[in-house]
Amino acid sequence: MRKSVGTIRSKKVIYLDHAATSPVRPEVLKAMQPYWSEKCGNPSALYKLGLEAKLAIDNARTAIANTLFCRPEELVFTAGGSESINLAILGTARAYRTSCSSPNIREARRGIKTKRGHIITSSIEHHAVLRSISALKKEGFDITQIGVNKEGVINIDELKKAIRPDTFLVSLMYANNEIGTIEPISVVGKIIQAENSKRSLATRHSPLVTILFHTDACQAAGFLELNVDKLHVDLLSLNGSKIYGPKQTGCLYVRKGIKLEPIIYGGGQENNLRSGTENVPGIVGFAKALELAQTSREKEGQRQTQLRDYFITKIQKIIPSLKLNGPLPNSTKHKSSAHRLPNNINISFANVDGEALVLYLDAYNIYASTGSACTSNSADPSHVLAAIGLEEKYIKGAVRFTLGESTTKADIDQVLQVLPRLVAKIRTMKTI
Ligand SMILES: *Cc1c(COP(=O)(O)O)cnc(C)c1O
């Protein structure tokens, strides 16, 4: 039940949940438009209408490859970020299992414990990663989850120690969707590269598998560089819905030479890795969205960083007993060593139920969320906030505001006006 509380209501919709999904840009809609109807051909068809659709996909692939500094044939279009992640994780695991299902005695002596192999991930990944990996655990793979510090940055030493001779996959996110922490992906990439060259030298007589490095870049594409060589990644997942593109669009970058088993079988589209008639308008829209996001990322990043820090500085002054979750903004007195996504604000209000606050804000047409949109269907407390060691009383009171291209200072001022009253109201109701 969503009723209005209080008398003042802003009419303007203030959407501050861009990390959950973003509106589709008009330019993206325009680019997609012809492919719904007049250019509706199946890309596999031989006639002109089919070739036209195929050409549209080829152009989209080339444009994305230019952004990622990879080859067009290294990209697989998927229906969104979750599918891209599932393909990366399940696909490598299944390819690995068939090629390396039984460690020989020598390998066993060197510490290879399982037949299936070992995967490393972190405790703050998106559920698409965590649950794909849990599924593999049931199939007999061994998993290590490394921890993070209180700003949400992965522990590099823990990662180095976790690497075993039978480790074949490391999956770590580029930027966190709940608290905005940007992870040191290229540093990890270099560590894995060094480990791989050590392996190829030391084990010539009984070669170990190389470690593949996958990153979930779904939250990063709007603000960060996506050069796969600079990041030293082998697999990278992207989606359209976080970058003003259509939902259920995305892709997986797969470095040349890496073998994957598909997770969807059928007509063999996308180089046999993702069967099914291609989502031509979706692919066209996704490519356009990525191009525009990357063109504007620096300018928008700076603008949103300013708004973010303005919000954080003000809110800390006007509302007592709150806590900023994730890295501190660099503009504050206490400089943080970690970096935060320009659009992410995650705040815990003590003695406030975050869900109640989200619903009260809704009555004012202000849209925020409790941490992750993907967990909000369940009553489970955020695994990310638990991983950064946040106390119980703050975990329940967390609300995430994620800014976007349409967010203005006036929007933030409006939120700053409404929020203190609502927090106070919820806190008084609690004590009655
Ligand atoms: C949204 C998101 C996903 C899932 O993407 P979908 O397109 O919704 O499937 C995965 N990882 C992160 C970090 C995300 O923010």
Image (tube, rainbow, N blue to C red):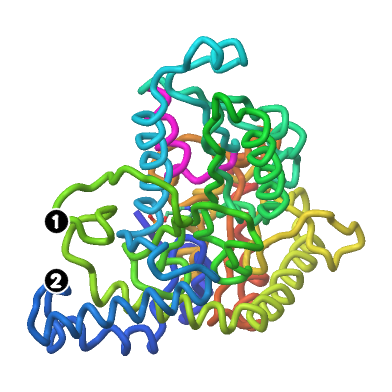
Q: Which residue is mark 1?
A: 267
Residue 113 vs 58, above or below: the answer is: above
Q: Is residue 420 magenta?
A: no
Instruction: Decide if residue 199 is on the left or right side of residue 29.
Output: right
Which dot marks residue 407?
none
In the image, taking residue 42 as reference, residue 345 lies left or right, namely: right
Image quadrant where residue 98 sits? top left
Q: Amino acid at mark 1?
A: Gly
Look at the picture and state if 371 lies above or below 53.
above
Residue pushed farthest right?
A: 333
**Element marked by disc 1:** loop
Residue tagged 2: 44
At numbered mark 2, what does the secondary structure look like: helix, strand or loop?
loop
Can residue 136 be seen in the rendering of this structure?
yes
Rendered position, 45 above or below 344: below
Task: Quadrant for the C terminus, please.
Answer: top right
Find residue 241 and report its image quarter: bottom left
